[in-house]
Amino acid sequence: MTALTLEALTKTFPRAGKVVDSIGLRIEEGEFFTLLGPSGCGKSTTLRMIAGFEEPTSGRILFDNVDVTYDPPNRRNIGFVFQNYALFPHLTVAKNVAFGLQVRKVSTEEVRQRVAAALEEVQLAGLEQARVNQLSGGQQQRVALARALAPRPSVLLLDEPLSNLDLKLREAMRAELKDIQQELGMTFIYVTHDQEEAMTMSDRIVVMWKGAVAQQGDPAAIYKNPSSTFVADFIGKSNILTLGTVARTGMIWDVAVAESDIKLRATNGSEDARYCVIRPEDIALAAERKSAPKEMNVLTGTLRRIANLGASLEARVEIASDIEVSVLVRSAEIDALPGVGQQVRLGIPPEALKLLAD
């Protein structure tokens, strides 16, 4: 197991400019660590620098406090799983998995043992002689994973390895990848643009934006306490309202939503807050005949549309001219919703509001 440190890691390309901007990170031994962000944010370039496929413009990469910044990939003891798997379609499963070991001139008997062990780990034992082009997408992904694991790397790097799979298979492979990582106790560094993947598997997530770290932490903390509207919008669904005025009275923050008559109360905030973030699941339908607790924010709006998401419904409610919020409702509560075009009351606890400056 290996801990990894990035110190002010920067990468500039002649035409694209600075794509990774002075990133500093510490990834602990045995951690499932995810670089998450939209296309072009620098996450794959960061991974390729860790692997040794790209040379940093500046900064350092340390494995267990040993500087490997300019070492080639074969001197870093890493495994790499590519987005397109990079398998040899004309070779058997066993020969694909053995390839990296043979390049390292491992003995024939040890190659056989390691190939068998790696295929056992990814539940492909018995398919040694099958050709890769005869396998399903999920099986090919497992072959790529077995090939990366066979040399016994101290760190495994994975660059969007599930993006070519259908939804059901992706969900199954998420669980398998996490199980394998925990069983081996190996450091996994995973790149994805899929926030659900990141939330499901990761011990810690770094959200990247414009080549820099927007926020890092465990999945629950990032979801509950986003540091910016970008993070709030990228991790899960959010209602983001622009604020007009912000004032504090004791322990309560009174805010006014810009270009409306809406006033809200929050339990945390700051004087420089410009936005209010509310998760759709934190908004409740307020019963017409029941009086809400006095601290509750109660809004009246018009139900504009309902989307059936299966286990839940997403209701879009217009609370002011050109201002709508999403509300998640359990499918079992569909009878509590009025018809589209009718009025609905919403209850929002003050602690559900996150006031942000950016």
Image (cartoon, rainbow, N blue to C red):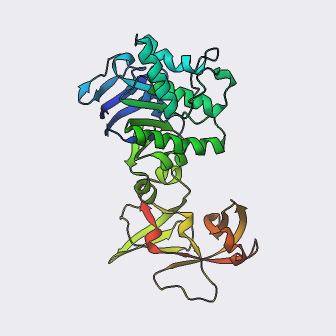
In the rendered image of this protein, does residue 214 appear above or below residue 69?
below
Q: Residue at x 32, y 24 (%)?
A: 58
Residue 270 versus residue 135: which sits nearer the camera? 135
| Rendering coords of residue 138 (x, y %) | 62, 34
Residue 203 versus residue 117: which sits nearer the camera? 117
Does residue 9 appear left or right of residue 189 in this picture?
left
| Rendering coords of residue 335 (x, y %) | 72, 76
The residue positioned farthest toward the left in the image shown? 65
Q: Residue at x 71, y 61 (%)?
A: 307
For the image shown, how many numbered marks are present on the structure? Answer: 0
In the rendered image of this protein, does residue 146 appear above or below residue 223?
above
Choose top left, top right, bottom left or bottom right for residue 337: bottom right
In the rendered image of this protein, does residue 2 appear above or below residue 272?
above
Does residue 304 appear left or right of residue 71 in this picture?
right
Can residue 57 be seen in this snapshot?
yes
Quadrant containing the N terminus is top left
Q: Residue at x 67, y 22 (%)?
A: 133
| Rendering coords of residue 33 (x, y %) | 40, 41
Can residue 320 be seen in this snapshot?
no
Choose top left, top right, bottom left or bottom right for residue 330: bottom right
| Rendering coords of residue 323 (x, y %) | 62, 64
Q: Residue at x 48, y 64 (%)?
A: 243
Residue 165 versus residue 305: which sits nearer the camera? 165
Residue 225 versus residue 98: which sits nearer the camera? 98
